Image (cartoon, helix red, strand yellow):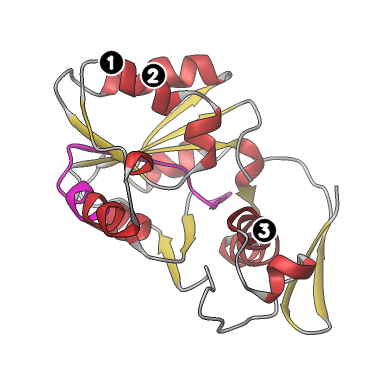
Amino acid sequence: FIYFYTFSNHITFPMLPRPIHHPHKKLERRHFEAYYCPTATEAIEKVLSLMPEGSSITWGGSMTIRDMGLTKAVKEGNYNVIDRDTAANPAEMREMMRQGLLCDYYLTSTNAISEDGVLVNIDGTGNRVASICFGPNNVIVLASLSKVAQDVDAAIKRVRGYVAPVNSMRFMGKTPCAVDGTCHNCVSEECICNQILVTRVCRPAGRIKVILIGEEYGY
């Protein structure tokens, strides 16, 4: 596949296919706990093994963790779950997001990872990047190897030029990229590229646990 990343009208950045590099050791050097699981089933088993029964758990708006069956497995386990998907209205969902900042474990994916082990995330509301930075005692990140980009700049281009337009279409947002799949560097009221978080080191060490998955999930 060839993805075209655009940051303003008429300016595109073609990203050609290239070998996927495995950032496992680079993540560990940056004080993340890092694991590799060839399949989603093994990744779910790893996540459940990291979380003691009775822990409070929540998650962000990640398609990866939903599509791979992780949220279903957690809800079937012996955990105290705050599930934002069950909110009756936007106000209740916002309150659940606030409560999630005090959870024992926060489950999420990441928009991209550099080959050097840096996490890159871009958010609309900001609850996900806030939780990655501070709040929950532990953050567990699950990501397919296809999310590995050459460097931080390439990671940001991947998110702005591919991931964000796909998500805007999924949300049926009123943004230029939801119309034509191209980033216009907009300042729309419904823009989902409002906060950019670059996590270059995990502090305290081990708080963020990254599980790389050999199978394809998410965007």
Q: Which residues are magenta?
A: 97-116
Return the x and y of residue 204 as percentages of the image width and height.
20, 49
Compare marks 3 and 2 and give the one earlier in the sequence: 2
Name the residue rendered at 40%, 15% in the picture.
Answer: 45
Dividing the picture into quadrants, the one containing residue 198 is bottom left
Q: Disc 3 residue type?
A: Met
Dividing the picture into quadrants, the one containing residue 171 is bottom right
Marks 2 and 1: CB-CB under 8 Å?
A: yes
Q: Disc 2 residue type?
A: Ala
For numbered disc 2, what is the local secondary structure?
A: helix
Residue that numbered label 3 is attached to: 169
Compare marks 1 and 3 and give the one earlier in the sequence: 1
Q: Determine which of the numbered discs, if any, sits on residue 77 in the image.
A: 1
Residue that numbered label 2 is attached to: 73
Return the x and y of residue 179 as percentages of the image width and height.
75, 69
Name the residue rendered at 61%, 46% in the picture.
Answer: 148
